[in-house]
Amino acid sequence: MTRTDAQPDPLKAIRRLDHQGLVVANYMVGPLEGEDGRSRVYGGRALGAAREVNVRIMRPEFQDFRASTGHTSNRYVHELRLASEAGGAACVRHLDAGTTAAGEHYLVRERLSGQVLRQVLAASERLDFPTAIGVVADVAGCVEKVHELGFVHVDLRPDNVEVTAREDGSLEARIIKLDLVVRAGDPPMHGGRPAFIGHGAFVAPEEAEGKPLAPTVDMYGLGALLYELTAGRKHLEVADRPEAVMDYLRGHGRLPSEKLRNLVRGLPDEADMLVAKCLKRQTPERPGSVEQLLRGLQHVLKMYQEANKQAVIPPGLWNRLTR
């Protein structure tokens, strides 16, 4: 009798193995540290050196999905190139990208030297207002680099920002990932198809509607970020689904649903005015550039200082708001 059992695919067997101990380029993959629907993130280190890194390996199912839509190129190579052009002051340094022996796409980036902003919020609930302005100003500067390269960042959540302490006690912020960037003028895409790629409260109306994205999408995200850092809560509690966002946008509510000055004592009206401007549903009504946003932040900080004479403003913060 002829044996007809299908032989195991050795490539699939390799893809099922734990990646710890795998060597990619000049880096040894360490233990699993986190994962999402697109990739798994491992610790790691450079071979023959003390440098610690993080290694992102794309999930096979996501890679297969991309291939099914005709996208077989390694998107991490594009992210590496974009991060290199943006510079280390804008985002966490990206070191290498390629494909494992099993055919999985990987990206190596420097290990975070500080904390993820979401972790800071989990520990302290919210930031004091000058610190929140400084973090948003730093993130805006990072976003400006992305815009200069012809892209829109889209993903400006606290989960995607690293913060480290400055000498004056304030926080310095950098973007961690550039994996969801969209070329300015293109609609939001996922696997080569129009799709919802953002996250809940940080999704601008035009993104939820699948319209072409402009830099003003990131002005919306920066306004949402300032609100959450200041209030310790999102400006809008909504699920990470386009239907949930669109249901709200079709209603008669306003953004944000509750004013900052009702939640945090001592904030000037100008803080709510700036956030509301960033969160306008119509894109022409938002700040048109990072420079305009920074001018708005500078004005709000002046009003805050006048209303709170005892507030400590780090001297370097004013320079970070000046173009």
Image (spheres, grey):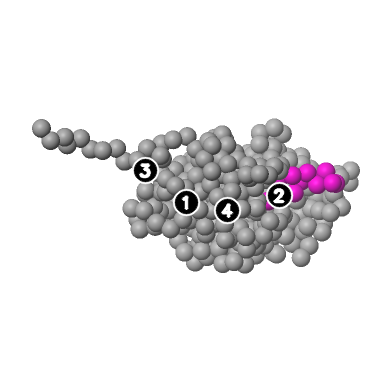
Percent across and percent down for residue 120 are 69, 37
Looking at the image, is 239 positioned above or below residue 195? above
Disc number for residue 11: 3
Q: Nearer the viewer, mark 4 or mark 3?
A: 3
Find out whether the residues at labels 4 and 2 contact each other: C-beta distance under 8 Å.
Answer: no
Label 2 to label 1: alpha-carbon separation:
30 Å
- Residue behind mark 2: 173
Question: Tag 4's secondary structure?
Answer: strand
Find out whether the residues at labels 1 and 3 contact each other: C-beta distance under 8 Å.
Answer: no
Label 4 to label 3: alpha-carbon separation:
23 Å
Numbered label tally: 4
User: Which three-letter amino acid code belongs to the residue tagged 1?
Assistant: Thr
Q: Nearer the viewer, residue 295 or 199?
A: 199
Q: Quarter holding the C terminus?
A: bottom right
Q: Nearer the viewer, mark 2 or mark 1?
A: 1
Q: Nearer the viewer, mark 2 or mark 3?
A: 3
Comes first in the chain, label 1 or label 3: 3
- Residue behind mark 1: 99
Is 170 colored magenta in this rendering? Answer: yes
Q: Nearer the viewer, residue 82 or 146?
A: 82
Is 316 colored magenta in this rendering? Answer: no
User: Which three-letter amino acid code belongs to the residue tagged 4?
Assistant: Asp
Percent across and percent down for residue 129 are 76, 45
For the record, the magenta segment spans 163-174
Comes first in the chain, label 2 or label 1: 1
- Residue behind mark 4: 96
